[in-house]
Amino acid sequence: MGVLLLATALPAQAQLPRFVFGRSTSIFQQNPDRVATRIGAWLDGSWVDNDRKPGSVDLNHANVLVDARWRDLQGFVEVEYERETGLDGDRKSSDFEVEQAYLRFRPLDVFSIRAGRFNTPSGIWLPIHWAILMDTIEKPPHATKDLLPEQQVGLELAGRIFPKRLASLDGQVDYSLFVGAGGDEIGQDDVHGVTAGGDLRLRLRQRYLIGASAYHQKNDRARDRSEQNLLLYGEVRLPGALTFRSEYLHQWRGRPSGAIWSRQLDVGYAKLRWDFARWFYANYRVSYGDDDRPGRRTTEQLVNTFTLGIQPHRAVRIKLEYSLHDFNGRGSEDFRFWGTSLGVRF
């Protein structure tokens, strides 16, 4: 009642903004003087199996988000329930957390500032992050918590520039600079101290993408080992409904406390997607590089992944997947993986 009286007493040009709610992103194209709030959700589950351990059926993710915008301001909150099963049969415990929570001020295309908890702006896979939107069930090797964190807690400066003509092609340049912090008390238990990074990408005619990301952190699980990362990536949309994409990560590692040596790490992937029908696609990805998960002997891994995607409805996504995992070294056993996942967006 007090808010209503206050709004009535204010001059017309100073009255409080009205509110409008919806589920579609088109709600943000309405009157900018209104506070537009989108409430959405998605969930996915899977059946996975391999030739080493018994298969399992799990609800992997259940996410709910609230996205509110008014003029140049945005507030975004996403909470998640997660329970993932490794392709080799190792199960992770269930986890409930605030996935993202940030405020963004974007007065111009060329400049915006974001503060809070947000997806790490590095490469192609990490900023998108949602498993339901990805081509495959399995993550590529660089997009694991063991190498790069999924989120940052800190501050980001970002923007985009639209040159009229760039290399005789219509182009767009996007940049991001960010700093963050790590620690158990803020939900960044794998990182200690200050983190920092940046991302720069060039897009031409909405068909070509090339970019590079740099990132620095101290790995709390490796005795505060210093890690510097360079991520190179690109994408090309080819004739015949084909899309080629690749990401490559090189990590320089400092010597952890008490260690007498350090090593570097390389991982990457290349993939080709064919959208051969309106609701169907086929995807082949080859992943390669060092398998360096905690508690395991470091070895080189080659993974061939074949995926068939089906989208019978714009809100429903089904994936059928088969992959071959070959290890070059002792301590890891080759295995085959097969599985299916079902995701629904609301």
Image: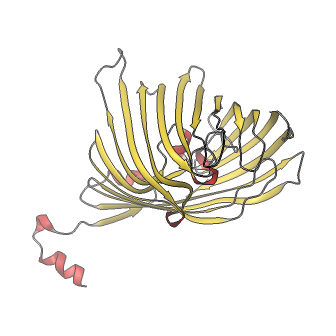
Where's residue 161, x and y in %? 31, 32
Where's residue 102, x and y in %? 40, 58
Q: Is residue 14 left or right of residue 36?
A: left
* Quarter assignment of residue 190: bottom right
Q: Residue at x 70, y 35 (%)?
A: 290
Residue that sits furthest to the top in the current view = 168
Relative to 97, does residue 324 appear above or below in the rendering? above
Relative to 97, does residue 281 appear above or below in the rendering? above
Q: Residue at x 51, y 67 (%)?
A: 185
Q: Quadrant of the N terminus?
A: bottom left
Where's residue 113, x and y in %? 32, 49
Where's residue 4, x and y in %? 22, 79
Q: Is residue 330 left or right of residue 201?
A: right
Residue that sits furthest to the left in the current view = 11
**Colour basis:** secondary structure
The count of marks equals 0
Q: Residue at x 17, y 79 (%)?
A: 6
Front residue of 272 and 248: 248
Front residue of 293 and 165: 293
Front residue of 21 and 63: 63
Q: Quadrant of the C terminus?
A: bottom right
